[in-house]
Image (cartoon, helix red, strand yellow):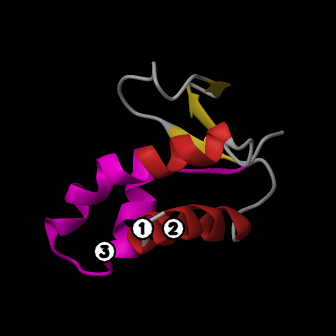
Amino acid sequence: MPDGDRSLEDAILGLLDRRAPGASVCPSDVARAVHGSRDEGWRELMEPVRRAAARLAAEGRVEITQHGDAVDPARARGPVRIRRPG
């Protein structure tokens, strides 16, 4: 796995570790944290973050949710959130 992919996965898990149990993060939170700048460059990371979250979901390490319900990342359209499995 490329280092960039692993850093996105690590960022997702790290942000979740700093949240309360059951709390979720938005992919944009992850993209902004990894990008680390105030400019809009974080937007380019949105799809890579979603793919990283899907890989973690396939491993059972996170869930992708919409409206609070776990969804299949391959079928999710629109805004999603990422949380630890409950």
Residue 39 x, y percent position in the rendering: 15, 74
Disc 3 packing (10 Å; few <14; some 14–19; many ≥20):
some
Decide if residue 52 is on the left or right side of residue 69: left
Give whichever of discs 2 and 3 has the lower sequence position: 2
Decide if residue 7 is on the left or right side of residue 79: right
Decide if residue 45 is on the left or right side of residue 56: left
Residue sticking out furthest to the bottom? 37
Quadrant in which residue 43 is drawn: bottom left
Q: Which residues are magenta?
A: 23-50
Separation of residues labelled 2 and 3 (CA atoms): 14 Å
Query: Mark 1 = which residue?
Result: 2
Whether tag 1 and tag 2 are in contact, CB under 8 A, the answer is: yes
Q: Regarding mark 2 in the picture, which secondary structure is present there? A: helix
Separation of residues labelled 1 and 2 (CA atoms): 7 Å
Q: Regarding mark 1 in the picture, which secondary structure is present there? A: loop
Q: Amino acid at mark 1?
A: Pro
